[in-house]
Amino acid sequence: MGRYTKIHLTGAIIAAALMASAGASPAFAADLTLRYDRPAQDWESQALPIGNGRIGAMLFGSLPQDRVQFNEISLWTGNEDVMGAYQAFGNLYINLPGHDLASVTEYSRELDLSRGIAAMGYRKDGVTYRREYLASHPAQVLVVHLSADKPGAYTGEIELADMHNAPTTVEGNRMTSSGVLTLEMARQAARRGRGGQAAPPPLPAAGGTDTMHYESQAIVLNDGGSLSVSGDKIAFRGCDALTILLGAGTSYVMDYEKKFQGEHPHKRLTAQMNAASTMSFQQLRDEHIKDYLSLFARVELDLGATSSQRRALTTDQRMKVYAEKGDDPGLEAMLFQFGRYLLMSCSRDRLPANLQGLWNDRNNPPWNADYHTNINIQMNYWPAEPANLSECHVPLFDLVRALMVPFQKATAAQFPAPDGKPMRGWTVRTSHNIFGNMSYVWNMGGNAWYAQHFWEHYAFTLDRKFLSDVAYPVMKEACEFWQDHLKVLEDGRLAIPNGWSPEHGPRDVDGVTYDQMMVWDLFTNTIEAADILGTDGEFRDTVAAMRQKLVGPKIGCWGQLQEWMEDIDDPNDRHRHTSHLFGVFPGRQISVTQTPELAKAARVSLEARGSSGDSRRQWAWAWRCALWARLRQGERAHEMVRGLFTYNTLTNLLGNHPPMQMDGNWGITAAICETLMQSHTGQIDLLPALPSAWPSGSVKGLCARGGFELDIRWKNGKLAGVTVRSTGGQTCRLRCADKVAGVTLSAGESCLLDGALNRL
Ligand code: FUC
């Protein structure tokens, strides 16, 4: 499938980033460093995340014992029959006796998004100490580097502690901890109940059957001084500097045929660790920065200047002032880039981002840290295409395809085909794990929402092979399911039966707007896909005929867009979900230009949902921000950014549902894209919902459907100029306020237009 790579970095950005000392960000206009003046004490709200798309860590920067709490994205209990939960992997501890916080000065801790490097530093007894942490994708290891400006300053111990009590063995400078997960562990977690939900039903008898092997390794490399084995730890004495490599792996394979069980990770992990240990820290660091920038540096965002007093504050203090006074476009731009940073850090070439991305310190995390299909996993991927991280979308497609057989089987058991026909298609329940086991209520329209992501990947990249080989078959099967399961109402219209608008109101009702809109979206995308591929004419027409008969969106008695087929919406309903507005965003059934009356009704509904009570959930702000942007209400969109920061963002910038959950971080990045550019109605709208808080600024590298990449500049609230690059050689219609321009470019070509959309 189309794993294409786009690298269009200037050598200057890479060179500047490699040369600059961590802390300042000379390669980027915006300031992109999260900064704190004390160590993290709380995992959820203060520790800082790093990740390479597969393994990651939460960093505490603590003294005298530093804690690197690490994860690997596939460490799950459970299997195809049992839900299980995403597990914590372990902790690496760095003990420096005598380095008590009380005895040090000038302590600082930071995460530099412009290079993907975290750091901490302090002074003690005339020595300046510095520690850097990175998660290397090319080397597949986490790296911690301890340095000091005087020789021989490091004496202490390093410890590797597994979260399931597997013992650690030490050989030379390497620590290894291997363990196995069993069904009994999933059973125990289930007994405890999770995430405030009732404990699930008892599990089938399964004894202690092994479900997954896993291993972590740490290698300690010293400059000067000496290393020695100290029980199950490694001691170091009088070292000038230390480099610690940390790796982890599991036996999980994304392959149903193999029951998702692959080889023991020992060999692969050992090879990765050995290879990394032949490189110097500088080499590992340079290689990491280069790789990191190949994704991160594609987009630059400048929303306007923040005062130097504000910029001088630590991030937690800055957030407090922002909550009171607003007026910190730099912090808002940082939140945007943080979403991109997080997606790159947990979704590259293994599993997709779960509810917590890949960061988790518990063996019974809230909601199992699973894949939730009624908003959460989709929101995780909203920024992937517009924010120029298309490759990071691919793990989602890989998982959905790998789980297709278990999804089909569960669907067949729940929704047998009518009249004894052979079963076709698939759909999903609200939650699933990495082995295809599903739990919680059926989310029948969830197949359409998953299919939307496959289509969008094509719509942005124009990767035709992906469309024909990967996306279209998935979309078609979802359509076939609906061909067999739509209910014909008395008046001949077609309704999705027995739905529930997540997660409130009547259950088991027909024609819920959320379901209807998702299936409309699926049919629309499938029709377009068949047209593009020039395939399946008859099927395409059948889908078109079904779409024609679908129960459509309706305006209710208080001018609202009805959430249900019956006009029963309560104007005082402040529920967090805004599912009936799917057709506004992320769908395209309703738009200000094409269906103005319905857009007006959507606005009434969104207004009524308010921003108090249950509406104050981190992902709810992000969805509403995107909705207001699509409704071209820039001020309201900006209120959502501010609300998210004020009520549901932790001091490490992670979203607080509560508890910590990451979808809102990704949602807000996508929503900010929507304020600056939209491309869902067949044209590219520039600055469709620019708030007055960002009067002048620029964005580089946003992606639009049709294979376009845009740099947009604005001044005093007006477009100042735009550069359009084409990857697919298509024609586009640009629109800004009342100006319109057609642009035709061949693949690889770009052009520049002024603020009035005149070609320069
Ligand atoms: C959905 C939401 C909840 C939460 C959970 C993980 O069910 O309604 O707010 O985000 O997913």
Image (cartoon, grey):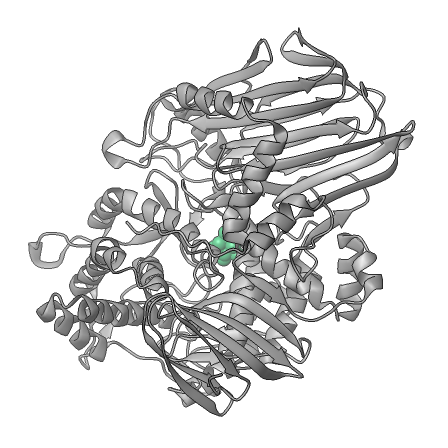
Number of numbered discs present? 0
Q: 211 or 94, which lies in front? A: 94
Q: Is residue 346 left or right of residue 204?
A: right
**Is residue 493 among the parts visible in the rendering?**
no
Q: 743 or 42, which lies in front? A: 743
Is 520 situated above or below 292?
A: below
User: x, y (%) of residue 349?
Assistant: 41, 42
Q: Is residue 206 left or right of residue 317?
A: left
Is 617 situated above or below 759?
A: above
Is 642 situated above or below 235?
A: below
User: x, y (%) of residue 148?
Assistant: 79, 28
Look at 48% across and 17% down and name the residue there: 178
**Is residue 574 among the parts visible in the rendering?**
yes
User: x, y (%) of residue 248?
Assistant: 50, 27
Q: 337 or 552, which lies in front? A: 337
Is 261 situated above or below 341?
A: above
Look at 70% across and 13% down and name the residue there: 235
User: x, y (%) of residue 673?
Assistant: 52, 68
